[in-house]
């Protein structure tokens, strides 16, 4: 499902801050060399993530699902001067690709890529997260939420990608991935620890603000 036409998307991008040269190259090379380039956050969503990160000025960002590193580079733009972004992904091939671009970025010393199972790695990271971006295997979205929600700072944000899943969340009969995403949306929107806002940006972004005092 396309929520807006390609023509309207191009119009939105025209009046949005441009990608820098490194992000533009990463975008192009991902489409040329890596399978499933649709997984890339891309220009408009990338600028949204950078915008939110810049507003928060986070000290610690956690990203679950690195792919080729585009979203991590966008999120890193808003880090505080001594901030750190941890990004987790099990895929060795795309991690090598991402590291190439991380090493060329002005934020390279602020990004740490951890290869492996996020459910095993997250409990070993002893930080309070100001911003979390979830864009990994859809069937574990709820498990990731459970692992991190109590470690998010008051007023901090959790952002989950692909929560509309090409519109399949409206289907009466759902496959396993769609069921998992629908369950994540249902659970998080009724969780008193967070304030939800589901945005029809790209393939759907669930933005969850950690409630103060919880």
Image (cartoon, helix red, strand yellow):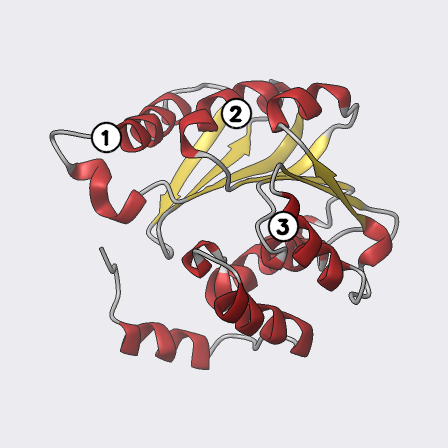
The numbered dot on residue 93 is 3
Q: Nearer the viewer, mark 2 or mark 3?
A: 3
Please name whichever residue, 134 or 121, is drawn nearer the observer in this view of the structure.
Answer: 121
Whether the residues at callouts 3 and 1 have beta carbons within 8 Å, the answer is no
Outermost residue, left side:
172
- Which residue is located at x 60 percent, y 56 percent? 68
Percent across and percent down for residue 169 are 23, 37
| Residue that label 1 marks | 175
Mark 2 vs 1: CB contact within 8 A: no
**Residue 47 placement (x, y as % from top left):** 55, 64
Question: Which of marks 3 and 2 precedes in the sequence?
Answer: 3
SS under mark 2: helix
Q: Earlier in the sequence, mark 3 or mark 1?
A: 3
**Based on the displayed image, in which of its 4 quarters is residue 119 positioned?**
top right
Q: Which mark is residue 145?
A: 2
Query: Which quadrant holds residue 51?
Result: bottom right
Q: Nearer the viewer, residue 68 or 3?
A: 68
Dot 3 crowding, Cα within 10 Å, few <14, some 14–19, many 20+? few
Residue 97 in percent (x, y) is at: 66, 58
* 206 sits to left or right of 154: left
Disc ID at residue 92: none
Q: Secondary structure at mark 3?
A: helix
User: How busy is the neighbourhood of tag 2: few (under 14 within 10 Å), some, or many (20 plus)?
Assistant: some
Is 161 on the left-hand or right-hand side of 200? Answer: right
Residue at image position (28%, 78%) is 7
Q: What is the crowding at mark 1: few (fewer than 14 residues within 10 Å), some, or many (at least 20)?
A: few
Q: Quadrant of the C terminus?
A: top right
In the picture, measured across the screen, residue 206 lies left or right of residue 67, that is left
At horizontal 54% and vertical 25% (from top left) the residue drawn is 144
Q: Earlier in the sequence, mark 2 or mark 1?
A: 2
């Amino acid at each position: 499902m396309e929520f807006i036409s390609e023509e309207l998307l191009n119009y939105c991008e025209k009046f949005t801050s441009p990608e820098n040269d490194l992000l533009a190259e990463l975008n192009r090379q991902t489409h040329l060399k890596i399978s499933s380039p649709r997984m890339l956050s891309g220009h408009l969503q990338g600028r949204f993530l950078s915008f939110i990160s810049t507003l928060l000025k986070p000290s610690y960002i956690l990203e679950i699902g690195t792919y080729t590193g585009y979203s991590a580079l966008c999120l890193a733009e808003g880090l505080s001067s001594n901030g750190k972004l941890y990004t987790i992904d099990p895929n060795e091939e795309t991690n090598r690709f991402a590291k190439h671009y991380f090493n060329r970025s002005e934020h390279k010393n602020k990004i740490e890529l951890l290869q492996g199972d996020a459910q095993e790695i997250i409990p070993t990271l002893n930080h309070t997260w100001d911003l979390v971006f979830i864009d990994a295997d859809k069937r574990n979205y709820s498990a990731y939420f459970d692992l991190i929600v109590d470690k998010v700072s008051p007023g901090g944000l959790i952002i989950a990608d692909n929560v509309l899943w090409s519109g399949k969340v409206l289907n009466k009969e759902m496959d396993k991935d769609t069921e998992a995403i629908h369950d994540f949306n249902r659970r998080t929107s009724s969780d008193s620890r967070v304030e939800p806002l589901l945005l029809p940006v790209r393939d759907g972004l669930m933005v969850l603000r950690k409630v103060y005092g919880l």
